[in-house]
Image: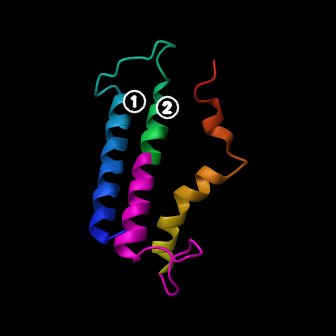
Amino acid sequence: MSPRAAVVIGLFSAATGVLIILAGLGVLRAEPSPDGPAPPWVLVCTGLMFVFVGAAVIVGFAVAGGSGPDGDLPAGTPFTVRLIYQRPDRVVRQPELPALDCVGRG
């Protein structure tokens, strides 16, 4: 992915996350689903994940230059860039954090 495409995709993801957060905080009006409205904390957490993933895409592909064939960043990538790139991925994949399992269950 080119750095320009990474920035566009990352900004789109982050902007989507901000809209979801604003809906969760009550700033934007959101139509509730037929099953009932989601709790505000669910919307805020979901929005934060979109923002973090957008930042990870920008940092990983526009700043660090993308990942190699093994899925890791190139050798010599600074620790802070590596941390920002990998943190959202680690949170989503953690089997100890089944927070997303509760979403959608009645």
Residue hosting label 2 = 41
Residue ranking furthest to the bottom: 76
- Judge from the rendering whether residue 76 lies leftward or rightward of residue 28; answer left or right: right
Picture quadrant where residue 61 is located? bottom left
Q: CA distance from mark 2 to mark 1?
A: 7 Å
Picture quadrant where residue 27 is located? top left
Q: Does the stretch in magenta take in 70?
A: yes
Q: Which residues are magenta?
A: 50-77
- Local secondary structure at mark 1: helix
> Where in the figure is residue 47, as x and y percent of width and height?
42, 41
Q: How is the image coloured?
A: rainbow
> Where in the figure is residue 81, as x and y percent of width and height?
45, 73
- Which of pointers 2 and 1 lies earlier in the amino acid sequence? 1
Which quadrant holds the N terminus? bottom left
- Residue kind at label 2, given as amino acid type: Trp
Front-lying residue, 71 or 92: 71
Instruction: Name the residue rendered at 49%, 74% in the picture.
Output: 67
Instruction: Name the residue rendered at 47%, 47% in the picture.
Output: 49
Instruction: Name the residue rendered at 53%, 86% in the picture.
Output: 75
Query: Badges 2 and 1: C-beta atoms under 8 Å apart?
Result: yes
Q: Does the stretch in magenta take in 94?
A: no
> Where in the figure is residue 13, as x and y percent of width and height?
36, 49
Q: Which mark is residue 24?
A: 1
